[in-house]
Amino acid sequence: MCATCGCGKDATTTVLNLQTGEQTVLSRGGHHHHHHHHAHEHVHAAGTRHSHSHAESRAHADAGTMVDLEARILAKNDALAERNRAWFAGREILAVNLVSAPGSGKTALIERSIRDLKEELSLAVLEGDQATANDAERIRAAGAPVVQINTGAGCHLEADMVARGVSELKPKVGSVLLIENVGNLVCPALFDLGERAKIAILSVTEGEDKPLKYPHMFRAADVVILNKIDLLPHVDFDVARAIEYALKVNPEITTYQVSARTGEGLDAWYDWLRREAAAVREAALI
Amino acid sequence: MHELSICRNIVAIVSDAAKARRVRRVTLEVGKLSGAMADAIAFSFDIATQGTVLEGAALEIKEVEGRARCEDCGAEFSVATLFDACACGSHRVERIAGEELNVKSMELEEAA
């Protein structure tokens, strides 16, 4: 990891199919990694920033050609996400994007959901992590097909990674696809993957004010799952306040209180999955 | 550090449109509630543009203040966060500005 910009020397994304053991590299025309220190920035009139290199400032005297672009920066990711969404809809697949800070129990929740629901629903998992296939091994042991996506330096999944992962995973018609994003409450909020819903997981060992601290994520989420409630007697977490903050950021959000370890409260989350999976199947009939 | 991803997308959009001509300046519109920080974009821009037709280009970022409309009383007001409530007490507000994340324009060198 590069200390200057946060990008890694190895910016490559790899996709590991746990069923076949085959690993492939996602080619995305990576960037050249050179820092240069000639650029400087100054702040001009209100709200306008401007940075340029010394060499280029001399060229300002010549008139250039102005071209209006009016392009949304994330349009390409959004277009690929829409393609994923159409692919999921056509195959009656319920795709959900699970997001949280590292260590809040995303993988444990997925493992438990697979163990409890695998006789009833067809579940498949895309695992996103910067490195290692540790989580994918856990999912495979729980009994679901899984593909691990390692983002290298990347701090979130993007739609093209999901498209590639899905082409390896080949989830069945009518299945539930759980996409575990990289543990991070900031970056994944901006990148649509083509999911039907984002599920934010917040554990009671974290601060109850996280919805206020990371409003983009809780705003983008459809559901917030408060996990590790078996630990409530041992921590100062205020459940009512956490829910109040989540609703303040997102008045439409649905909240569930669960323990992936003891199984408490999971039925309501499973009912949500059943309901949404049925809705996806019904939508395909129209 | 999603600003680096954002800058790679800027490079893709601008270099496609520039068709191999050198780019002298890129102007962005970044809403203050977009989830991307102008400072971090400026920082990542130099890295993402290395070895492209944007290398050395000036970057201009026009920041856009957040504005919202109350879905209950209809008032329009400035917002500093994603969850500012309306003065009437309602949290049901629709944001109408501040989430922009756009490439507005580019300035190309004259073709030789």
Image (tube, rainbow, N blue to C red):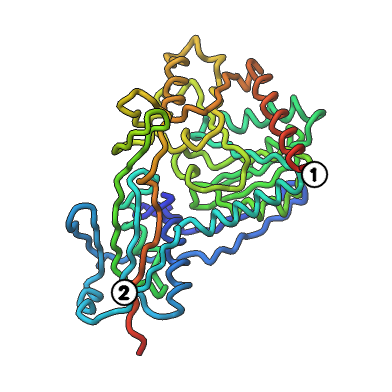
Q: x%, y% of residue B55?
A: 36, 72
Q: Quadrant of the C terminus of chain A?
A: top right
* SS for callout 1: loop
Whether tag 1 and tag 2 are in contact, CB under 8 A, the answer is: no
* SS for callout 2: strand
At 75% from the left and 49% from the top, the residue drawn is A90
Left-right relation of B16 to A271: left
At 80% from the left and 44% from the top, the residue drawn is A173
Left-right relation of A252 to A160: left
Residue bearing the label numbered 2? B24
Between B67 and A110, the one lying in front of the other is B67
- Name the amino acid type tagged 1: Val
Residue bearing the label numbered 1? A173
Q: Quadrant of residue A275?
A: top right
At 48% from the left and 46% from the top, the residue drawn is A190
- Name the amino acid type tagged 2: Arg
At 58% from the left and 21% from the top, the residue drawn is A256
Spatial CA span between label 1 and label 2: 50 Å
